[in-house]
Image (cartoon, grey):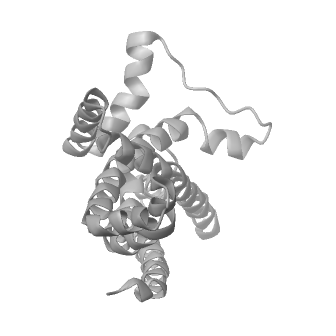
């Protein structure tokens, strides 16, 4: 029985890890795109994006998960695509519920990353833009060769906080029965076993510790941008 429960928790760990990883893969570039829209000189676009970001940051992530999973089907008869790889474990764990959760997490975190990017870009003195243009560089060259690396250094700490929060927020996916580690632990709790809950807590602690160490080392490598 112990090995069976451990296997269920391991399956939940894999789902949690992939939800975390894929959310970062999609939300980081999407956040940059949203940032450019926020800073656009085309007012209608920037206003619309500000409203979207306000809604995403101002409402609970759990609510957004419910909306993305249930509303399309209730209002538009939309059905999230089913996995059909022939691998039963994969098709079961990465079903429509996982896809809906991934979409919700990616959009939500992109909104937070967008504001972090915007703050980082605006924190760089305008004189550096002007100096680059005086040297004959294009606006694109100024941004990617001079500004971007400084922005990355400035945004690492706030992004680190969001990444650490994401590790814990993945547990919210269980509200639509995504079989992540908290869902698996909760099932065993209902069966009368309490230790899986503490095992899940230990997983989050270890996972966050590893993520914190990686982010800390990344920040130290960028210390040469300190002025």
Depth order, front residue of 139/76? 139
Residue at the top extreme of this rendering: 76
Counting every numbered tag in the picture gives 0
Image: 174 above or below 121:
above
Name the residue located 49 percent from the left edge and 58 percent from the top edge: 181
Depth order, front residue of 110/151? 151
Q: Quadrant of the N terminus?
A: bottom right
Residue at the right extreme of this rendering: 86
Name the residue located 39 percent from the left edge and 14 percent from the top edge: 74
- Residue 91, horizontal then vertical, whole percent: 68, 39
- Residue 86, horizontal then vertical, whole percent: 80, 36
Q: Quadrant of residue 75?
A: top left
Q: Quadrant of the C terminus?
A: bottom left
**Relative horizontal placement of residue 17, taking residue 113 as reference (left or right):** right
**Relative horizontal placement of residue 64, taking residue 215 as reference (left or right):** left
Image: 105 above or below 149:
above
Depth order, front residue of 202/132? 132
- Residue 76, horizontal then vertical, whole percent: 43, 11
- Residue 105, horizontal then vertical, whole percent: 41, 46
Image: 107 above or below 160:
above
Name the residue located 29 percent from the left edge and 38 percent from the top edge: 41
Image: 9 above or below 108:
below
Name the residue located 60 percent from the left edge and 64 percent from the top edge: 10
**Relative horizontal placement of residue 87, taking residue 65 as reference (left or right):** right
Q: Is residue 32 visible?
A: yes
**Relative horizontal placement of residue 154, taking residue 6 as reference (left or right):** left
Q: Is residue 174 visible?
A: no
Q: Quadrant of residue 67?
A: top left
């Amino acid at each position: 029985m112990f090995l069976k429960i451990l296997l269920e928790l391991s399956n939940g760990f894999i789902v949690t890890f992939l939800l975390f990883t894929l959310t970062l893969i999609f939300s980081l570039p999407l956040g940059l795109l949203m940032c450019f829209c926020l800073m656009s000189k085309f007012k209608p676009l920037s206003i619309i994006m500000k409203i979207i970001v306000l809604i995403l940051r101002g409402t609970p992530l759990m609510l957004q998960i419910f909306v993305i999973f249930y509303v399309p089907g209730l209002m538009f008869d939309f059905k999230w695509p089913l996995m059909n790889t022939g691998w039963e474990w994969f098709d079961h764990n990465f079903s429509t519920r996982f896809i809906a959760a991934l979409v919700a997490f990616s959009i939500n975190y992109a909104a937070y990353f967008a504001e972090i990017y915007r703050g980082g870009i605006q924190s760089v003195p305008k004189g550096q833009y002007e100096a680059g243009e005086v040297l004959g560089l294009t606006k694109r060259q100024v941004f990617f060769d001079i500004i971007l690396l400084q922005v990355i250094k400035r945004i690492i700490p706030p992004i680190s906080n969001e990444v650490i929060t994401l590790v814990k927020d993945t547990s919210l996916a269980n509200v639509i029965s995504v079989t992540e580690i908290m869902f698996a632990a909760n099932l065993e709790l209902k069966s009368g076993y309490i230790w899986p809950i503490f095992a899940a807590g230990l997983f989050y602690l270890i996972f966050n510790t590893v993520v914190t160490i990686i982010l800390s080392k990344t920040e130290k490598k960028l210390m040469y941008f300190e002025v």
